[in-house]
Image (cartoon, helix red, strand yellow):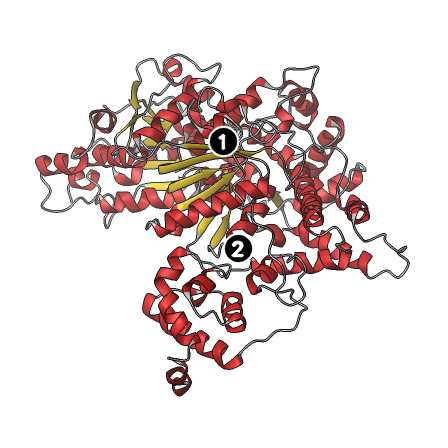
Amino acid sequence: MSVRSERMGSMPADATPENQATRLDGGLDPQQKAAVLAPRGPVCVLAGAGTGKTRTITRRIAHLVANGHVSAGQVLAVTFTARAAGEMRGRLRALGIGGGGPQVQARTFHAAALRQLKYFWPQVVGDTQWRLLDRKFALVGQAANRVGLPTTTESIRDLAGEIEWAKSSLVAPEDYPATAARARRDVPADAEKVAAVYDGYQALKTSDPDGILLDFDDLLLHTAIALEDNAAVAEEFRDRYRCFVVDEYQDVTPLQQRVLNAWIGDRDDLTVVGDANQTIYSFTGATPRYLLDFSRRFPDATVVRLERDYRSSPEVVSLANRVIGAARGRIAGTRLQLVGQRPSGPEPTFAEYDDEPAEAGAVAKQISKLIGQGVEPSEIAVLYRINAQSEVHEQALTQAGIPYQVRGGEGFFTRQEVRQAVTALRQVAGRDDLPDGADTGEALVTLVRAALVPLGLTETEPAGVQARERWNSLTALIALTEELLSHDPLLTLNGLLGELAARSEARHPPVVQGVTLASLHAAKGLEWDAVFLVGVTEGTLPIAHVLGDSNSSGDEAGIEEERRLFYVGVTRAREHLALSWALARTEGGRKTRRRSRFLNGLIPDDSPASRIAKPARSKRQPPRCRVCGKQLMGATATMLGRCEQCPSNLDVELFEALKQWRRERSREMKVPAYVVFSDNTLTAIAEQQPQDERALVAIPGIGAKKLEQYGADVLAVVRGERVAQTLDLT
């Protein structure tokens, strides 16, 4: 094989320069094409949301290989997630890059460093053994215990997070207190003690009798040092890799930049891609300054701006531009003004509700409407700032019979702190020394609060990311207790536990392609046809701990990062975008909240949200048990139309016939049986035996769409027209 053909990276045998060029730059817009065809050397691609950056950089790599600038095996492309690296490799394979020969190395920073360190370690260190420490929890716990800090799961996670930030920021233990103060870090404990834990953790890693322990940050640091301090190692590496590509460059940390500098040396064959408007990981040490200063470091760099948004409708793009256009402190020349390329769509909507349950109910109703219009549930997302906000939306979707999945976190009732809280409440309920009335009515809230204090419930929000997550979940349980009391003033602790158990049981759907519930951080890099951005209030978005108090204006850098997080949420939507907020947390609660400052100037004057919107819930009287007449509590009781403890008049034969009919329909439609109707809905039908559409649609879980799809069949089964046939089948 000639040198030329080897450097082509095993392109197809019938490839000619003409059809190569057509294949690699065909279908690109002028800016994408400029990035792809830019000469070898430093290139900075400022790529806005939805502008096709992955397509552009993979085509650029293919262009460099196809034109003999570099062989496929000499390209190292790094990004921040294994998913993104896998997508890059797949696209390069589709372009014919690598073929049967050496392929482009597309990896995360850590995966690339691990591979290199394994190879170079014997040359640099010798026979000393090392192994990867993939979980630092135990060692951080030991170090925390030695300095007298709490060793709860959340405390250790917060300390580990601070250690990771310090190492990513190239901050030594002795420099941590001063640096953390300058950076206005939300430290989980006294900074001197955090520094002592950091120092102790570092010492523990070198005391392992089986060799040195290296965590993921150590992989990067030792890789950089190996290249910086060993000329032979650096020469071998730089002969192997000649061309570098970095995706999501706005999220690079000082430690990752040090590794990149060591890889490159004094060369400049580097392409970086990023968007400073999407910098949302500063709390991990990420900084956009390397992206923003790229043309200063490389004065001859080619800078290309991708601003044509192929993801979102012009209406969504316009709103996104206005969100980020209000940002402060952005460097001139780095501001991207997106231009929507999709057909026109509906205007984004804004809505204000009295309380969170009303907001969640309205969102579930709108989602049901979209699904009825043909939007796939998997193409719909509900996005929020903190994970504790998912509880009320999980409940609303469950009651509406809409399948969902929680991304980037656990469902509310499966979170560790919530499981611990329920266990603690069960222990209290099992005591025989509670005074009469101590677990009933208003006293119940006091009792629940007391039970949750040992688990981390405090009067004020604590410092530390993990501690705040726990605190938010516990306060959500208090809010849920208060909400249930508003429906049933005589609620007891056992009644509360029964309701929590029913809600937990109702929210264990199999893994399905349902509506996505996700935090804004977990939504980064994803997109949906419809996005509901909920809870857009001061203290939530922006988050409370960056706002300061009455004596300070808050953390301006932190507030701007929250604005960018809001921008990321808006740009996840392709066509439908709804933004909403609630004035109170619980139903009937005091309306003390106000909408986010980020909404200022965005809401049209003629929008209902420019005034207080009407609550979405019906004004009808709450449902009551058809057996005893008491007000119904919980999704299961509401579905059945009776208290769960009241006697059932279930027609067993009809129930079995309904289940058989459901099995047949689910097979025909190739969907899980519960997508047709849940067991609770079938039970309600078999108990109430509706004889017409009006009676059928009165059963919760049977809306207009399901009535249209299944109403005639169900009524036929109830009338016995299919019962005999069904029983014959069984």
Question: For residue 398, which numbered disc appears in the image?
Answer: 2
Check disc 2 and report its element: helix, strand or loop: helix
Viewer-nearest residue: 237 or 485:
485
The quadrant of the picture occupied by the N terminus is top left
**What residue sits 43% from the left and 56% below the top?**
703
Snapshot quadrant of residue 672: bottom left
Snapshot quadrant of residue 574: top left
Question: For residue 31, which numbered disc appears in the image?
Answer: none
Q: Taking 697 as reference, is 185 above or below it?
A: above
Query: Which residue in the protein does label 1 denote?
Result: 224
Answer whether residue 252 is visible to the viewer in this image.
no
**What residue sits 25% from the left and 47% below the top?**
101
Viewer-nearest residue: 109 or 729:
729
Across and down, in percent, residue 580 comes to: 50, 34
Mark 1 neighbour density, 10 Å: few (under 14) some (14–19) many (20 or more): many
Amino acid type of the residue tagged 2 in the rendering: Thr
Viewer-nearest residue: 469 or 438:
438
Across and down, in percent, residue 728 comes to: 39, 87
Across and down, in percent, residue 342 comes to: 26, 34
